[in-house]
């Protein structure tokens, strides 16, 4: 009886050992199939999983608008600059003008009228111009004289265009120019409230009959006695201006002028 009891105990011991060995084997196989991740490997996985935040470049202003609608350098910025602006975009030739300026590495502001961006094609043109690096400004909805409108009508003329531009390019305009340079106390306050810098211009000629031709408009834009440091040049989306644009830029540079980047202009605070 004693021998039988010892035999049973020995058999049970062997059985328990065998089961333990099997569990150890299974654990080893699992570890082979799913190896533990080291701290170094885990850090690499987390780095890959992280979404990099876009780097926002903050550009310090180098110029501010003066009382004569030109630009004064802040600090030691180059004073011999000229700002190029194109009104009534995108009527007929805005995209051509943007391509010309892009080839010349000449920055500019394209001031848009809302009634010109009422189609998918025109909205795509504005987006393309913006994607090329040009500033998009607000020139009202219908090019109406703001001084002839009620406050509600002025608000509609201005805010609707800012809303449209924001929908197209993802940001609201930073600059505003009233048609005919006609502003009101209400429009000035509204424009500032909407975060835009109100500007008129130093000179422009392409709406006058004697300058509705390539050579004539190029000559007056370059050689007028009104040309000065910090000048704010008004041009329009017109056939003759588009054709003369390269000559105008080259001529201004020939006189030592640098084309002012709108990104360097101090905005509203």
Image (cartoon, rainbow, N blue to C red):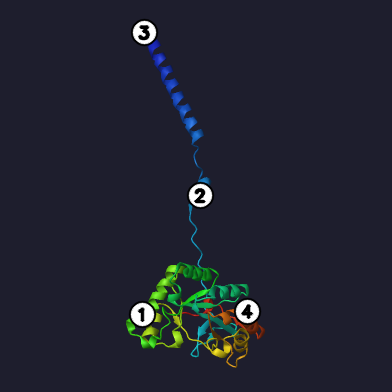
Which tag, 4 or 3, sits closer to the chain's start?
Answer: 3
Q: Which mark is residue 43?
A: 2
Q: Residues within 10 Å of mark 4 (few under 14, many from 20)?
A: some
Residues at marks 1 and 3, CA–CA distance in whole angstroms:
108 Å
Which tag, 3 or 2, sits closer to the chain's start?
Answer: 3
Instruction: Write down the residue under mark 1.
Output: 155
Toward the viewer: 104 or 28? 104
Toward the viewer: 241 or 68? 241
Q: Quadrant of the C terminus?
A: bottom left
Residues at marks 4 and 2, CA–CA distance in whole angstroms:
54 Å
Residue under the image location 51 percent in, 52 percent down? 47
Q: Is residue 116 left or right of residue 77?
A: left
Residue 246 image position (x, y, % from top left): 62, 79
Badge 1 marks a residue whose secondary structure is helix
Instruction: Write down the residue under mark 3.
Output: 2
Badge 3 marks a residue whose secondary structure is helix
Instruction: Write down the residue under mark 4.
Output: 246
Q: Are the residues flagged by discs 1 and 2 in contact, CB closer than 8 Å?
A: no
Give the quarter of the image for residue 83. Answer: bottom right
Which tag, 1 or 2, sits closer to the chain's start?
Answer: 2
Q: Are the residues flagged by discs 1 and 4 in contact, CB closer than 8 Å?
A: no
The mark total stands at 4
Q: Quick check: 123 above or below 259? A: above
Which residue is outermost to the top? 1
Foreground mark, 3 or 2, reads 2
- Can the viewer see residue 60 in this picture? no
């Amino acid at each position: 009886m004693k021998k039988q009891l010892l035999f049973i105990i020995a058999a049970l011991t062997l059985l328990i050992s065998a089961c333990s060995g099997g569990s150890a084997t299974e654990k080893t196989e699992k570890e082979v199939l799913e190896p533990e991740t080291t701290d170094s490997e885990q850090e690499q996985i987390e780095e890959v999983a992280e979404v990099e935040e876009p780097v926002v470049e903050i550009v310090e202003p180098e110029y501010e608008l003066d009382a004569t609608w030109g630009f004064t350098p802040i600090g030691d910025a180059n004073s011999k600059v000229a700002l190029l602006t194109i009104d009534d975009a995108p009527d007929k030739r805005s995209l051509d003008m943007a391509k010309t300026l892009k080839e010349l590495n000449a920055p500019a502001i394209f001031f848009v009228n809302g009634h010109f961006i009422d189609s998918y094609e025109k909205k795509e043109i504005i987006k393309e111009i913006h994607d090329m690096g040009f500033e998009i400004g607000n020139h009202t909805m219908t090019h109406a004289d703001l001084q002839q409108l009620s406050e509600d009508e002025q608000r509609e003329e201005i805010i609707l265009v800012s809303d449209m531009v924001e929908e197209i390019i993802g940001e609201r305009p930073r600059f505003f120019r009233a048609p005919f340079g006609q502003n009101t106390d209400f429009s000035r306050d509204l424009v500032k409230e909407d975060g835009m810098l109100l500007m008129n211009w130093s000179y422009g000629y392409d709406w006058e009959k004697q300058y509705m031709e390539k050579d004539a408009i190029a000559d007056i834009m370059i050689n007028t006695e009104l040309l000065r440091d910090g000048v704010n040049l008004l041009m329009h989306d017109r056939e003759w201006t588009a054709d003369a644009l390269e000559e105008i830029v080259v001529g201004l540079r020939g006189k030592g002028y640098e084309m002012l980047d709108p990104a360097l202009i101090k905005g509203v605070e």
